[in-house]
């Protein structure tokens, strides 16, 4: 995942985009950047730096981003994809004007396109699939930017939300499957804001208007929103990523008709029905499992307690790109509350289990703190398949559930019992209106074609 923001129609565009990135920090921790355009002077500016938003984009750097239009990006990469050269926004000048682009998602035909572009003489400055989109726009033979962008995006497969500026015009688009979220809001003082999650609108006091629809390209010019194209490959049932609801999105965000907190509580209640446990207390692995643990407690009647305290100055361990970094951060990130845990049968609720190393370390920590029993419950099904659409699950070998049974995982974690939410139970919790979701990481049912993988090409670094 990554987080993207655009702000149009206000002289404080870059500063509002900065606030939006701050709210999306949970979507990436490696780099942050903003590109702005000043319609009065025709000048384009950009700042990109490694690190958290507060470090990468300080007051001095924000003063270098004048203008009434800005796009911004917070970066999370797969292993091997880090580095400032891969940070966004990408900014170039081509025949139609100043172009800046930010991207959230993962293209499944990026390497095939890249090889074709290499043969045609293209020079690449990074290893990210997002740069492929810029080359496709610049090389399009279509006459207008509207048509060039539509031409470029129509060649893509996989998951993408993109925000693109061409001089003073802003474009936004989602892939036809709608894997990643993208929302539009109006700013109180005038102007428009687009972001990955509604929590980014909230910090700027923007009012939610609607989602960018799957397969839609919109254009914002002079404060007007126009839907200018519908991408080919229309699907009758979009496939938004259910893992956004399980783990990635912020609890106060509203996605696809559901507040994330509400969805996670429903997962927890259903989990308690499917996988009951005899325990004295329920605790969460904070923070992403808090809502699910509350739901489990509500359904089971077992009291919810704060058994683990999270150090909020340490980032999310799942999106740390190396295993060594994840192991080190577990001890830095969590501290057990011994008075709560000592002598108790503890039901631990986590949102998901991907590699298992973090959870194993947590279980050892709970045992050392005096827990009499540890019963582990997961508010999602076993993750058995890699994600090719933008989550860092690149190979089956890394996924503990791909090669181990539930009992073998229980032994590996060192817990007294282990239970997962069923795929059917998870989807039932969030399909009030017949919604469909991408559940490929749980079932192996990939909908968007895996072009590079099927051609024997390695998947590229996303975002």
Image (tube, grey):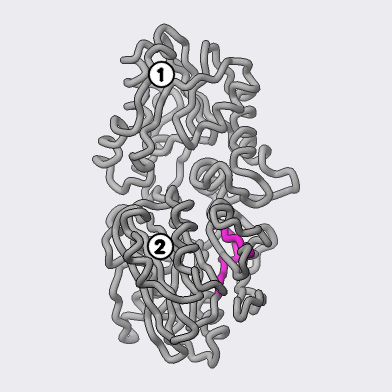
Mark 2–mark 1 Cα distance, whole angstroms, equals 37 Å
* Residue under the image location 39 percent in, 61 percent down: 462
Quadrant where the N terminus lies?
bottom left
On the picture, is 301 further left or further right than 95? right
Residue 181 position, x and y percent, is 57, 57
* Residue under the image location 60 percent in, 68 percent down: 192
- Residue bearing mark 1: 415
Image height check: is 23 above or below 330?
below
- Residue bearing mark 2: 463
On the picture, is 119 further left or further right than 260? left
Residue 408 occupies which quadrant of the picture? top left
Judge by depth and name the residue closer to the eye, 123 or 95: 95
Judge by depth and name the residue closer to the eye, 93 or 118: 93
Mark closer to the observer (2, 1): 2
Point out the residue furthest to the right here.
Answer: 433
Question: Can you see residue 53?
Answer: yes
Quadrant where the C terminus lies?
bottom left
Instruction: Based on the picture, tell me whether residue 30 belongs to the magenta stretch.
Output: no
* Residue under the image location 61 percent in, 64 percent down: 187
Label 2 vs 1, first from the N-terminus: 1
Helix, strand or loop at label 2? It is loop
Instruction: Based on the picture, tell me whether residue 173 belongs to the magenta stretch.
Output: yes
Q: Which residues are magenta?
A: 171-186
Helix, strand or loop at label 1? It is loop
Residue 134 position, x and y percent, is 42, 77
Residue 260 position, x and y percent, is 59, 43
On the picture, is 24 further left or further right than 232? left
Residue 413 position, x and y percent, is 37, 24
Judge by depth and name the residue closer to the eye, 406 or 204: 204
Dot 2 alpha-carbon crowd within 10 angstroms: few under 14, some 14 to 19, many 20 or more: many
On the picture, is 60 further left or further right than 301? left
């Amino acid at each position: 995942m990554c987080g993207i923001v655009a702000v149009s129609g206000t002289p404080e565009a870059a500063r509002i985009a900065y606030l939006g990135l701050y709210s999306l920090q949970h979507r990436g921790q490696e780099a942050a950047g903003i590109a702005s355009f000043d319609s009065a002077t025709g000048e384009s500016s950009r700042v990109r730096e490694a690190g958290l938003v507060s470090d990468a984009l300080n007051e001095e750097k924000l003063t270098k981003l004048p203008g009434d239009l800005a796009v911004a990006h917070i970066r999370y990469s797969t292993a091997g994809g880090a580095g400032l050269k891969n940070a966004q926004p990408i900014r170039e000048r081509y025949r139609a004007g100043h172009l800046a682009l930010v991207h959230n998602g993962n293209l499944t035909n990026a390497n095939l396109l890249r090889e074709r572009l290499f043969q045609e003489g293209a020079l690449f400055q990074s290893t990210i699939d997002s740069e492929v989109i810029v080359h496709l726009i610049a090389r399009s033979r279509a006459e207008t930017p509207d048509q060039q962008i539509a031409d470029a995006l129509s060649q893509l497969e996989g998951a993408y939300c993109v925000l693109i500026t061409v001089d003073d015009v802003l474009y936004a688009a989602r892939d036809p499957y709608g894997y990643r979220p993208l929302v539009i809001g109006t700013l109180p003082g005038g102007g428009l804001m687009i972001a990955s999650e509604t929590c980014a609108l909230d910090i700027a006091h923007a009012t939610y208007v609607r989602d960018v629809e799957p397969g839609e390209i919109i254009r914002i010019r002079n404060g007007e929103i126009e839907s200018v194209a519908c991408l080919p490959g229309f699907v009758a049932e979009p496939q938004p990523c259910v893992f956004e609801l399980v783990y990635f999105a912020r609890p106060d965000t509203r996605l696809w008709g559901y507040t994330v907190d509400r969805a996670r509580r429903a997962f927890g209640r259903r989990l308690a029905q499917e996988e009951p446990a005899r325990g004295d207390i329920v605790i969460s692995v904070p923070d992403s499992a808090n809502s699910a643990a509350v739901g489990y407690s509500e359904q089971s009647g077992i009291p919810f307690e704060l058994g683990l305290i999270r150090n909020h100055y340490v980032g999310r361990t799942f999106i740390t790109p190396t295993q060594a970094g994840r192991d080190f951060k577990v001890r830095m990130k969590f501290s057990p509350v011994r008075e709560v845990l000592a002598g108790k049968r503890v039901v631990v609720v986590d949102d998901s289990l991907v590699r298992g190393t973090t959870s194993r370390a947590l279980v050892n920590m709970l045992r050392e703190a005096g827990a009499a029993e540890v019963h582990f419950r997961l508010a999602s099904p076993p993750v058995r398949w890699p994600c090719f659409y933008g989550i860092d699950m690149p190979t089956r070998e890394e996924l503990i559930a791909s090669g181990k049974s539930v009992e073998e995982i229980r032994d590996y974690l060192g817990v007294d019992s282990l239970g997962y939410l069923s795929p059917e139970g998870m989807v039932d919790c969030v399909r009030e209106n017949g919604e469909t979701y991408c559940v490929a990481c749980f079932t192996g049912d990939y909908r968007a074609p895996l072009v590079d993988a099927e051609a024997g090409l390695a998947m590229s670094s996303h975002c």
